[in-house]
Amino acid sequence: MRRAVPAVVWLIVVVHLAVALAQTAVFPNARSPDERQQVDLVLQVAQGEAWPWPDPGTAFITEGVEAGYFVPVDRLPGRQHLADRDDVPARGERPSYADAGGGDPLDEPSHNQLIQHPPLYYLLGAGVVTAVPNWADQPLDIVWMLLRWGNALLTAALPILLFLTATRLRLPAPLPVAAAATPLVVPELTHIDSSVNNDNLLIVLAAVATYLVARVLTGDLRWRTGAALGVVTSLALLTKGFALLMPAWIVLAYAVAAVREQRAADAVRCLLVAGAASVPGALWWLRNRLVHGTIQPHGTHAEPPDLTPVYGWSDGGWDWLTRFVERFVTLFFVNDHDSDRSMDASWWMARVALMVILVGIGAALVRRSIPRSAALVLLFPIPALAGIVARGSWEQFAAFGDVGAAQQGRYLFPGVVGLMVVAVAGASTLVPGWRRWLLPGVLALAVVIHAAFWHDVWALYWLPADLGAGSLGGVARAVEAIAFWYPFPPVVLGVVLVAGLAAAGLLARWAIREALASPAVPQRMKEPVA
């Protein structure tokens, strides 16, 4: 692996991981999508209360999980000014899962809808929790943070998988390195990386599958590649329902490869192997159909709810569509934590990043930087995921009149590797002198969009009420509050930040040096000096 991946990509891995770990401090516990329910279900599995897997409508959020966070979990009414709060116990003295009531349901029972998902992610999370001695009696914010770190480490390989995919598609240097850096231009991706969320396992498995699909599209029709694709698909099917698109994706990849390579028999053989290897994961969904009468049960109802259409397009369909598109764009790149849909700095930067990606994809398709059929296969998960989510969101609107159900751009993240590689491939048509400036451009865009994102987040959560965002005193108090709230000692955050800044400095130096290199040298990627 070290010979296949140059040192500069490992620097990107360190920067990506450092950003995710820093966000574990900036975002208070339970302020990531469904994070309270995610942690609660992991803890219930660790205690044996949610294993065997509960039937639909039978799992409730437990009292114990309330010990792990100190902010509201629903829509925020406005800026929180957490630097002004003095009611949070000192580090190490915060309540434990057992202290807060353990596995007893809340006084006002609330369903944990996440049992609609398969159990693999929660079993893995429970393994992390049970490795902590007497975890139920430890301050729960520490256990929670260990789970967050585990998720960040799980997704740390994304830059490597992007690099390997771009390299397999034979993108000219240094475009594979630029592809590796693209997760940095999606702050919401690093935010999800830093939270407890089953999306993370699916994102990584889909990224591995994308690399394997790229191998298939470039002529790798060996049975073991098909077997690897099947195993990854099986694991994804045991993680989340969005993986149900993967069998169709794999069939499409092998069909394109069969035509391009004129090796139909080999493609069919590999496809059969992949199908056989994916059977264990597919059995979960067959079980749902046989036991519950539906492919994906509803998490809060023992029986599927009645989704008979009541509302139509004339009842607000245009409002539903415009909101759907806006939310998908915004919540792919950034997050609207108080749900006010304000056009703040991060909202506008999301549109800038989207235009850059669309221009890259358009150039790749028009100029055929990679074969057009291969590009469309790599992009397939994005419209497929969007279609799945749109269908579910429209069903909720048609049945209940809810114009905002299930409209989150993060649902597209399993397709992020194919999306970014094709976008970067659009730069292949540039002359080498311009091409070498792509990585500095990606890094500059990442800095600007993160600056906007973090400004909005700090203003919403941490800055004190009596000092503005531009006040050094206000920033200092916010930093002190973050360090106090964080369950790990401040030195841990210090090490993360120093390592991340050092890696970012080396990465920036390498990028600028390569961009300024003589045109006679460009194809060989020099190693950064550590």
Image (cartoon, helix red, strand yellow):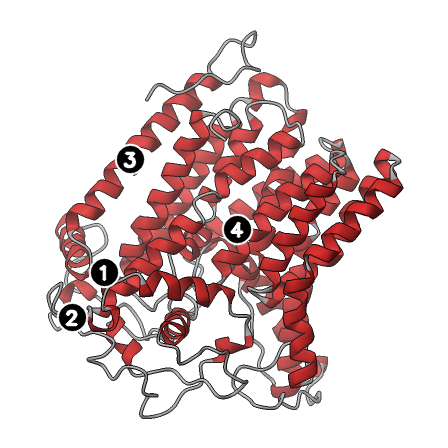
In the picture, the disc for residue 204 is: 4
Identify whether 5 is placed above or below 495: above
Give the Cα distance between marks 3 and 2: 31 Å
Give the Cα distance between marks 1 and 3: 22 Å
* For discs 1 and 3, the disc positioned in front in the rendered view: 3
Residue at image position (16%, 62%) is 83
Q: Which residue is mark 2?
A: 94
Quarter of the picture holding the C terminus: top left
N-terminal label among 1 and 3: 1
* For discs 4 and 1, the disc positioned in front in the rendered view: 4
Give the Cα distance between marks 4 and 1: 31 Å
Give the Cα distance between marks 2 and 4: 33 Å
Q: Which residue is mark 1?
A: 462
Foreground: 141 or 236? 236
Q: Which residue is mark 3?
A: 501
* For discs 3 and 4, the disc positioned in front in the rendered view: 4
